Image (spheres, helix red, strand yellow):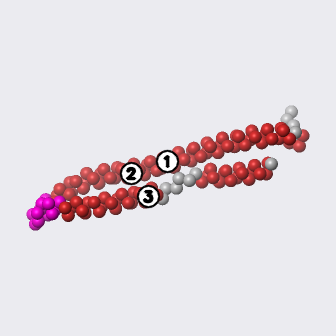
Amino acid sequence: MQQSREDRSLGELFADLSRQTSQLIHQEVTLAKTEMTDKATRVGKNLGFVAAGGVILYAGFLALLATIIILLAKVMAWWLAALIVGVVVVAIGAILVNMGLQTLKRTELTPHETVDTLKEDKQWMKEQI
């Protein structure tokens, strides 16, 4: 038969608190791992979209760039047509990279659930002592 809380010695109470604290810390670590895995998965997915979009844009731009350079070369020198098209492509590429980076910056990596439960655990431990 288990003793009531009032009947246990101070040593037993501290041993129980130590065991519960250890179990609580283990649960918090598990929660943090789960939460960070979820966030990392979302970031990886967004990075995949950025990379796939970049590859597709690159292939399309190559075909369009060749067409534009050929058309411009009919009214100006080839080198000038290629230079103009190159500057425009660099500007478009910079805009796309910036958009992808801004999306990644908005991704919150802080494990909020873990932080909240750690605050609750701190309060619980104060109440136990």
Label 3, label 2: how far apart the Cα atoms are: 11 Å
Mark 2 neighbour class, 10 Å CA radius: few under 14, some 14 to 19, many 20 or more: few
Q: Position of residue 104 (x, y in %)?
A: 45, 56
Give the residue displayed 44% in from the left and 58% down from the top: 103
Give the residue displayed 69% in from the left and 43% down from the top: 24
Q: Position of residue 122 (x, y in %)?
A: 72, 51
Does 72 appear in magenta? yes
Circle 3 is placed at which residue position?
103
Circle 2 is placed at which residue position?
49
Give the residue displayed 39% in from the left and 48% down from the top: 48
> Could you tell me which secondary element the residue under label 2 belongs to?
helix
> Could you tell me which secondary element the residue under label 1 belongs to?
helix
- Dot 3 or dot 2, earlier in sequence: 2
Residue 68 appearing in the image: no
Looking at this rendering, what residue extends furthest in the bottom direction?
75
Query: In the picture provided, is 9 more to the left or to the right than 49?
Result: right
Circle 1 is placed at which residue position?
40
